[in-house]
Amino acid sequence: MGGGVNPIEWVLPPLALTHTLVDQGAKAVGAKVPPAPGSPTAKADEAQDAAEQRAQDALTQQQQARDTEARDLAARTETPQEAVDARRRAQLSADRLGGGRRRASQTLTDTGATLSGSY
């Protein structure tokens, strides 16, 4: 078995040197060289992209919550006429269902009412 050098060993060092020169030239020109997959730079870039995406998602969710709250508030807001109509309906239903029943605050503030009871 004769020794010798594998031809791939002769090709790889010049190839690595060429890649290094191209990278340095691109950096000098200002071009962004994409990082190698799995490198620390690539992992940091992926983490930064994920953090930016989470922040964007959080802002979107907050905006959606504000929009939903505004719609709910607009739907719940009662006009003065609606408030009057609601009070009128409540009074009519109270009269129909036994208008003699009064709340304690109405009874105590009525000028003609007296508290009676046996002591």
Image (tube, grey):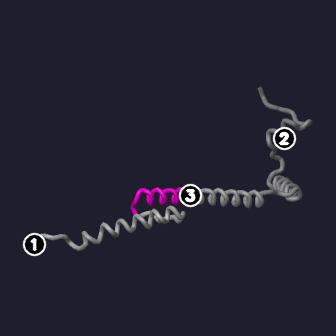
Q: Which mark is residue 98?
A: none
Q: Is residue 87 left or right of residue 9?
A: right
Mark 1 residue element: loop
**Please, what is the three-letter code of the amino acid marked with disc 3?**
Glu
Tell me if residue 116 comes above or below residue 53 in the rendering.
Answer: above
The residue wearing badge 1 is 2
Q: Position of residue 55 (x, y in %)?
A: 58, 56
Q: Are marks 3 and 2 in contact (CB under 8 Å)?
A: no
Residue at position x 53%, y 56% from top? 51
**Dot 1 surroundings within 10 Å: few (below 14), some, or many (20 or more)?**
few
Q: CA distance from mark 1 to mark 3?
A: 59 Å
Q: Quadrant of the N terminus?
A: bottom left
Q: Quadrant of the C terminus?
A: top right
Q: Position of residue 102 (x, y in %)?
A: 81, 44
Magenta: main secondary structure equals helix
Q: Is residue 50 rendered magenta in the image?
A: yes
Q: Is residue 47 left or right of residue 116?
A: left
Q: Is residue 72 left or right of residue 49?
A: right
Asked where in the image residue 111 lies, by quadrant, the reply is: top right
Pointer 2 or 1: first along the chain: 1
Q: Which mark is residue 106?
A: 2
The residue wearing badge 3 is 52
Q: Which residues are magenta?
A: 37-53
Q: CA distance from mark 2 to mark 1?
A: 115 Å
Pointer 3 or 2: first along the chain: 3
**Dot 3 surroundings within 10 Å: few (below 14), some, or many (20 or more)?**
few
Q: Nearer the viewer, mark 1 or mark 3?
A: 1
